[in-house]
Amino acid sequence: MTPPIVKRYLIAFDKYKWIGLASFGLVVAGSMVVALQPRQSRYVANGALTYNRPTVSFSATGNEINLQGQELSQDILLSEPVIDAAAAKVNVKPAKIRQNVVLTMPDKDAKTTGDKQPTPTLIDLKYNDTKIQSAQETLQALMEAMIALSAEINTRRLKAVIGKVNERLPQAKKELQVAEQKLEVYDRKERPAILAAENGSLLNAVTSSQVQQRQTQLVLAGIDTQIRSIQDKLGLNVNQAYVSSALSADPIIANVRAQLYQIESQIEILKKEGLRPEHPTMIQLRNQKEGYENLLRQRGAEVVGGKDGTAPLPATTAIRSRSNLDPARQQLANQMVALQTQRETLQEQLVDLTKDEARLRNEYSLIPNKQLERSRLEQEVALKKAVYDQMQVKLTDAKTAEAETVSSLGIARPPVVLDANKDRLSPPITLGIGSLLGLLVGAGVIFLLGSLEATFKTKEDIRDSLKQREVPLLGELPLMPIDGLNLGEVPVVLSLDSLYLEFYEKFRSNLRRVGGRKLKVVLITSTSSGEGKTVSAYNLGIASARAGKRTLIIEADLRSPTHSSSLGVTSDPDATIEPLRYYGNLGEYIRLVPDIENLYILPSPGPVRQSAAILESSEIRRLMEDARERFDLVILDTPALSLSNDALLIQPYTDGIVLVTRPNNTQENILTEAIDQLVESDLELLGVVINGTDITMPVPYSYMGSNYPPEEPQARVINGARR
């Protein structure tokens, strides 16, 4: 049996043989060109550069620049300025120098040898030329240009450092000044409080305020005791004592009150003498009394009214009763008023002391935050100052390094010219090697092009893919001959003695085994056109009819014309005009296939427009229901899945789907995607058949009058299985 990889290569060779031959021809032609090239003398100039350092270094920046100069890459050393400078010096084209120079950088990973001694860091240079002097001069010019480039790079780096520092220095100075100003403003505002907290004066102020509050409260308690004692003696509160003292101390009120006492005494005397109230003297006295009473009220209002809010006395009797304090009681009243004034003053002081204590406590509680803020500002100033100082140091160091900046490269080995002429292979040997290489290249190109195709090359590839997805393989069908068929006809197995019939019978039995006894309606489709789904459907129907099953083939591919002529059936030419009416008359358009008992076919009216609408119509539904009742097996030949969704539209009327594949035709990604979608959508995928396989057909049996075939032909191997 031919291995699968050989099969795949033979298929690819059949498709891409001309490309392989072209590749072979190109390689052979190239070898011929090489073989026929005239021999030229070649010389190699060999030299080396090494990394060097200045003998005396006073600055760290100079050392850094020199170390950076030792990290030159091959692209920098062979850059256009170096090549152009050397080419201008020796009058050689830059392209020629770039083509013939070879530069080998030192191995950075191998810094030590076996005796632990550091190896020299050499940069090897080689230059090929046909002339000795030209090779030596060109390599010397290249080495000098590389040294000059190294010095220029170091100078540019140092200037860049100085420029960057000078560019950043004013900003760093400004940031330092801003930070110092912030700290100064904060100290002017908050530093006294912080110092007061640190030296304990703030805490002492809080304690002193508390002591003053307690002393004030004690004084207030003593004053309250004195006021209560005087109130008990006078029988007056503070306001009443103030009013009585004021009224008693006023000389006008005292004079008016004396006049009232005198008039009242006269009225009482006259009453006792028997004068009636209507007597003119009595009336005159009463008028005088009334006038003094009015005067007393006015004066009392003037004395007791004012800012304290005391209202004028309403009656003369009240004023007279309040203005009768003797000097001793008046002194007590004045004392009580004075104590009340002192008490109110102390209360105000106590309130102020309480507020001051609260303020001091609040200020003391904010001290930690103020200290943290000041520490932050101090750290910011220190950081800015450190940055500024470092930049100053860096600038000074970089300016010092200006006098030390030299090239990081030096000549370790001057150019030495060696003869590079070697014996070449003879032209026949060169052609032989080119031919062998051409065969390998041509075969590789063919194999590569075949591998890049996204199709299954052999049946083994399809079988492995199905095994990975656990999809049943229902059969492997041989490639049917098409000789003698007209255009549009399908190769079918009409003869009972055909050697192809047993493969479709095996396909039918496997389908029955997988689907069970309830399997009646089978949908046959493929992922793309040209895979043989119609051939498989027709011959499966023939195998089923030969097995005694009443079988119906429905051509459900309404986008393609009918192939019923392959079975000797002529379709109705008017079916395309009214396809729904066509499917509505089942008994009229279902045709019996001649020469094959039990086989019927419903030809397609296609190609028709709006095939999807026809497949979803009620006529198709009634057709499928009637066919399920009347036939043992119904086979639906549907369009490929990659062309339309017609197969999925009619799938609900079926019991399962069979996918037809074909080596060198079925796309790998399309088949795997179709299987995954069918499985994920819970559509009943019965299995897959492989069509058009390279199966060795059995030798026809010669019975020679016997009822059974001979023993040895019966045991012929077909596709790896004993028959």
Image: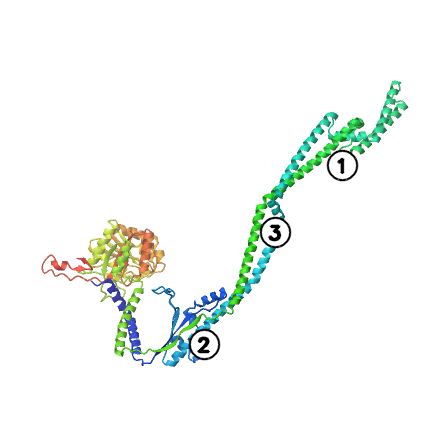
Q: Badge 3, how many Cα within 10 Å: few under 14, some, many 20+?
A: some
Q: What residue type is labelled 1?
A: Lys
Whichever of labels 2 and 1 marks the residue nearer the N terminus, that label is: 2
Q: Which mark is residue 85?
A: 2
- The percent coordinates of residue 71 (x first, y second) are 43, 67
According to the image, label 1 marks what residue?
Answer: 307
- Residue 229 occupies quadrant: top right
Q: 577 or 300, which lies in front?
A: 300
Q: 229 or 445, which lies in front?
A: 229
Q: Is residue 602 in view from this perspective?
A: no
Residue situated furthest left in the rendering: 705
Q: Which mark is residue 186?
A: 3
Q: In this view, does 541 lie above or below 263?
A: below
- Residue 269 occupies quadrant: top right
Q: What residue type is labelled 3?
A: Tyr
Secondary structure of residue under mark 1 = loop
